[in-house]
Amino acid sequence: MILTPETVAQLGSMELRARLVVEGFITGLHKSPFHGFSAEFSEHRQYRRGDELKHIDWKIYGRSNRFYVKQFEDETNLRAMICVDMSASMSYSSEGHVSKYRYATFLAASLSYLIMHQRDAAGLALYNTDVQAFMPPRSKMSYAQELMRTLEEARPAAQTGTGISLHHIAERLSRRGLVVIISDLLDDPETILSGLRHFRHDQHDVMVFHVMDPREVDLGFDASTVFRDLETGEEITTQPLQIRGAYRQAVEDYTTTLKRGCHALNVDYVRITTEMPFDVALREYLVKRASRSW
């Protein structure tokens, strides 16, 4: 079962949202060409010669007559840092859709849930003009609850400083891994690409999820409309119908610039809008995960 972002928003807690999104996604995987990807939800692995006997899970042995040992953080294959833009522009939502920030937090929570259940490590960074929260990657499921609580309690505010924030996050990562960036990328493209280049210089793999509201893509407003910059408060009144063509072309030009810049850096770029189900982004993550060996 694939849950829409609006349905997910009605669920009680961030942990419940993440769990149901991922479980629905996994169910869909088994019915799709992606069923070969490893999505086993296990915190154990089979016993190997040399493992300490004290780590054997005897309850599982009693049920299956097979030896399994509990895995620990230093056995993880991947360390993923999920970076979420919490600038004021992320609070925008058009009628009938969740805000970009809520969408980003639901996606970040779902990714961390999926990553940790695969015995990989996930961390979280929240930023606007600079890094506001930094939680280094860990693999314990109890840590996922801390990540989700941080996501749920944070509120978008202040202006965007994606480029400078990415540099500061890169400086705090001590080991190579995967960096996932979830942002509306409303910043100077060259500044953003400079931050991405820092990660690549440090040999991190990078994924960028460019989150946009559907109306930001198509300017689908009919009447005279007042547009207000959520970060500066500046307002402008215009007739959307008269500028729609030029606006759409400007959006395409901007995203093409980002996409080409990411491609040149060997960074995965995915544009998503807030009406899309989360399985689109989760599938992109699994493709990335399967193509690398950390």
Image (cartoon, rainbow, N blue to C red):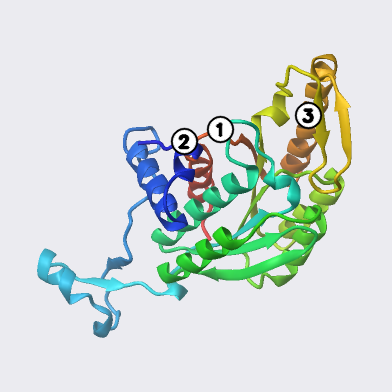
Secondary element at tag 2: loop
Tell me where residue 291 appears, x and y as whole percent.
52, 47
Could you tell which of marks 2 and 3 lies nearer the N-terminus?
2
Residues at discs 2 and 1 in contact (Cβ within 8 Å):
yes
Closer to us: mark 3 or mark 1?
A: 1
- Badge 1: how crowded within 10 Å, few (<14), some, or many (20+)? some
Badge 1 amino acid? Glu
Residue receiving disc 2: 4
Tell me where residue 236 appears, x and y as whole percent.
88, 32
- In the picture shown, does residue 177 fall above or below 212? below
Image point (40%, 54%), residue name: 16
- Badge 2: how crowded within 10 Å, few (<14), some, or many (20+)? some
Could you tell which of marks 3 and 1 lies nearer the N-terminus?
3
- Which dot marks residue 217? none
CA gap, disc 2 and disc 3: 25 Å
Query: From the viewer's perspective, is 75 left or right of 265?
Result: left
Residue receiving disc 1: 275
Tell me where residue 258 appears, x and y as whole percent.
77, 39
Badge 3 amino acid? Val
Residue receiving disc 3: 251
Closer to us: mark 2 or mark 3?
A: 2
Name the foreground residue: 98 vs 274. 98
